[in-house]
Amino acid sequence: MRHHHKHRPEERNGRRDDPRGQHHGRRRHGGDRESGRPFDYGDLRLLALAMIAEQPRHGYELMKLIEDQMGGSYSPSPGVMYPTLAWLDDMGYAAAQSEGTGRKLYRITAEGEAFLAANRRAVDDLRSRIGVVRPRGAGHVPAPVLRGMEKLKLALRLRLRTGPIDQAAAESIAAALEAAAQIVARN
């Protein structure tokens, strides 16, 4: 196994990280619940590593899995996910294996297993907070339904911003909404 880091895993650039990659109590850039993101980079690191521990995964697969487990309410962008995976690889917690297609498959390392074991409580708290361990059933809205609802809301907002809606357009929009409501009620 190759190691990219020269310092102990919890130290980088002379600073000591907490288990989620945060420095001295500051929130790291990359998101938090106040900005509308469910967690920051440190939390995403733990979640991604826990998912890789379940089975080796590609970055795109991790993004889709997180989106599904968050009920479609959040999906990490490639600009967030791939630096997170690079960090896990650099720290020696995951190893990237290049495939012939140019994609990388990430596997957990022994160091990554130890890191997860040392941070099991933080991982469990994170999964509980975002609802990953919640059983599907009452109250769970499937990701495709949430995406459809968000697309409809966005389309309506954008249309209302473009200017007045004449009577014919208003009747057409209302008919489409009523038809959609009937389809939803039947299914």
Image (tube, rainbow, N blue to C red):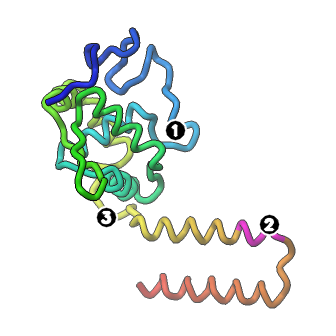
Image quadrant containing the C terminus: bottom left
View extreme (front): residue: 100
Using the image, tell me which numbered label, if any, was put on residue 33. Answer: 1
Residue occupied by mark 3? 137
Q: Residue at x 72, y 89 (%)?
A: 172
Q: Which secondary structure lies at badge 1?
A: helix
User: Which-is-in-front pick, marks 3 and 2?
Assistant: 2
Question: How many residues crowd around disc 1 within 10 Å: few (fewer than 14), some, or many (20 or more)?
Answer: few
Q: Quadrant of residue 20?
A: top left
Residue mark closest to the camera, 1 vs 2: 2
Quick one: 98 or 92, which is closer to the camera?
98
**Magenta span includes 161:** yes
Disc on the earlier residue, 1 or 2: 1
Q: Quadrant of residue 112?
A: top left
Residue 110 in the image, given as x and y percentages of width and height:
13, 30
50 up-or-down from 135: above or below: above
Q: Secondary structure at mark 3?
A: loop
What is the magenta range?
A: 157-162
Vertical arrangement, residue 7 with respect to residue 177, above or below: above
User: Whole-Å distance between the Cαs marked 3 and 2?
Assistant: 37 Å
Quadrant in which residue 11 is drawn? top left
Residue that numbered label 2 is attached to: 161
Q: Is residue 35 left or right of residue 26?
A: right
Question: Height in image: 130 above or below 163?
Answer: above
**Mark 2: amino acid:** Arg
Find the distance from the CA under tag 1 to the CA under tag 2.
Answer: 28 Å
The residue at the point 53 percent across, 88 percent down is 182
